[in-house]
Amino acid sequence: MPVYLDHAATTPMLPEAKAAYVEALDVVGNPSSIHSQGQNARRMLEEAREGVAASLGADPIEVVFTSGGTEAVNLGIKGLYWARRNPAPERSTGQATGVDAAAPTRARILVPRGEHHATVDTVEWLEKYEGAVIEWIPLDADGRISVDALAAALGPDVALVTMLLANNEVGTVQPVAEVVALAARFDVPVHVDAVSAYGHIPIDFASSGLAALSVSAHKIGGPLGIGALVVARTASVVPLIHGGGQQRQVRSGTQDAPAAIGFAVAARAAHASLAPLRDRVIAGVRAAVPEAVLRGDPVDRIDNNAHFTFPGCEGDSLLFLLDVAGVSVSTGSACQAGIPEASHVLLAMGLDEDEARGAIRVTLGHTSTDYDVDVFLAALPGAVDRARRAGYSDRNVHATA
Amino acid sequence: MSGGVDSAVAAARAVDAGHDVVGVHLALSRMPGTLRTGSRGCCTIEDSMDAQRAANIIGIPYYVWDFSERFKLDVVDDFIAEYSAGRTPNPCMRCNERIKFAALLEKAIDLGFDAVATGHYATIVTDDAGGRELHRAAAWAKDQSYVLGVLTKEQLAHSMFPLGATPSKAEVRAEAAARGFSVATKPDSHDICFIPDGDTRGWLAERVGAEKGVILDRGGDTVGSHEGAHAFTVGQRKGLNLGVPSPDGRPRFVLEVRPSTNEVVVGPKEALDIAEIAGSSYSWAGNAPADASIPFECHVQIRAHADPVPAIAVVRPAVRQTQGTYSVPISGENEMVITPVEPLNGVAPGQTAVVYVGTRVLGQCTIHRTTSAVPVPVA
């Protein structure tokens, strides 16, 4: 079996989550049906919602299940944007909204650089088609957003702030509480993408002051195909998907009770700290390849993430060589049809293109062992040597001429 | 693995032959199209997925390697530059020379591989001394040895063509179907892969820039005008729109394209007959002849799908022709000179002349000079 060190991409299902999921698949009934079998399915679904809510410090009514993290992020950002830009009385509970027709259009979205593509592509879509004005907040060399720049950009005309709780590539934990406090001065809602942080740092939605927060089940040992947007009682979001009006009219569609049950079991499972093993990876890489550079905040990072750049290497060469050696890792950056691109996160942190291309992200999970780390560390020096020899595939033009 | 049937079967055969095989798809564009269109059989995301599905069935790992930057510099930009200079390049040969059997091969060797295997129809023969020779494929109609003629001894030593001995493409398709490849009936690709709609002239016009110029006859008289010299190819007859009829009323053909002066020269069909071609950029596909300065009998082929014709070839000190009357030697430089037994029709500078001895590819040169069989009439 290859050694799996890409848990941030997806992590194996917890055995107890899988068992509960499979068992629930045998239950007949649509949670929206009125008969007793429907009610039974509804009971299972709502118990699951309670479980997920408890893991996030949220009220069950605030948990809106989605098809996954990407849909949650889309709903959070587009939903808050539309609701803020065009506050429409018919979308609220019916009472007058008191919207001043002369109020400035709130079209500005504040977004840190280095966000996940679910966010980047969503805000760029809003910019292109919905009149949004995007303001990119810079990152420092550790990948942390500039709170000063964000404070300076805030104002009553801001539609929303959206940001990661922890960066999915380099693992840096973001100063969300500070941002929420600043945004509150202007009543600006904040959405947080907590997909990579969930299960690794404690989340208490009730005390967070957030308007909305996105999570995904398969990153914490639940099933694929389900996630959630937590929407504060006080926040309103315009739906993306219309239909039967399920889940507070916010997310129509027959609800997937078995997936929710699997999700809830994973959400309530104890997540042991991976920091000791992660620190072994970091120390081991530094010993094996002294020129490797740890990226992201060295201290304030999620416990499963070790991210390095290897000078003179292409990340995809390293990934290939480690794969051949039986170790699955990631370059951390997005691919278009498998074409590697220099990570926009690393570029936002001030790395140049060449440095950014040599990135490897190692992420641990509940199945990770010392043996996994040993195999990785044993394979690494040879892979780095080879990858460095191969160099950059877009160089040495005309070398054969 | 392009996503086509040939490379899929080649990969499967390499596995059957006992090699440790990894499937590699070359990303040659930073912005690939999503779906396959028209006659292009490569380079879209759909093609990449086709390649991956074939690799899945074979049971080999599959990766996409990005050579888009080098492909742009070495193939696309080179294609534009050559056309701008009035030459007619073959981008597939450039790609073989610079990308598939250079950038890809170098990276593969650096990463621990021994060879690149492709779905080209050609054969490699190992001689008694262990040297490699490049030969035509058994399937003459599909033979691609011409576009591989640029490969050197070193490149051939690390190349494999598992389809070379197969008598027909139909057999390759049948084998693909038997192996369960979804691409078994995928149409063959033709056209230039980086020109999406196959409209080479339109594509070039956007990049080279077109300026009005004159069309001359061989005596130097203006007989028409054009919208940009790059749009013409030696041997072209249609689309000249000449205002002045030829003296004998016979059709005229493009004889020469002069991008530096933006002139196009036309003349009678027989003036396209070329008695001699020469190229100072030449290579040997395997061991060089013992003494190439002694003229030797061969066949020469000047296009991928042209028939080979009997010729005499020799390597001798390069000359620069002046007015077609006398020649000035260029010190220290050699050129390959090929004299077809019968004059060749429609040869353009920039094309590659591949020299065969029997089925063997001996070598090639990029044509930089042609000599007409019909002297220029005295004005």
Image (tube, coloured by chain):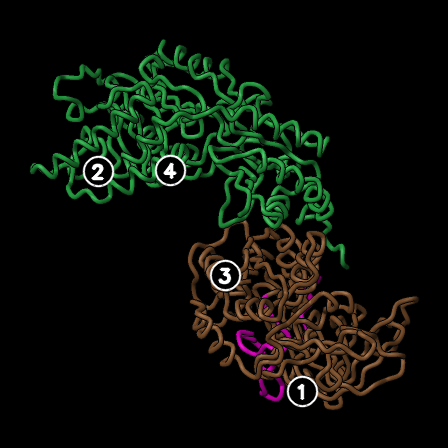
> Could you tell me how far apart the alpha carbons at marks 1 and 2 are, in whole angstroms?
79 Å
Chain coloured brown: B
Q: Which residue is mark 3?
A: B51
> Could you tell me how far apart the alpha carbons at marks 3 and 2 are, in whole angstroms?
37 Å
The mark lying in front, picked from 1 and 2, is 2
State which quadrant residue A122 falls in.
top left
Q: Which residue is mark 4?
A: A15
Residue name at image x 50 percent, y 29 percent = A114
| Left or right of residue B47, residue A53 in this image | left
Q: Mark 1 is on which residue type?
A: Glu
- The answer as to whether the residues below labels 2 and 4 share one chain is yes
Q: Mark 3 is on which residue type?
A: Ala
Q: Mark 4 is on which residue type?
A: Pro
Magenta part of the chain: B231-260
Q: Secondary structure at mark 4?
A: helix
Q: Picture coordinates of residue A208 (x, y %)?
A: 36, 14
The tint of chain A in the picture is green
- The answer as to whether the residues below labels 1 and 4 share one chain is no
Crowding near the residue tagged with mark 2, few <14, some 14–19, many ≥20 C-alpha atoms within 10 Å? many
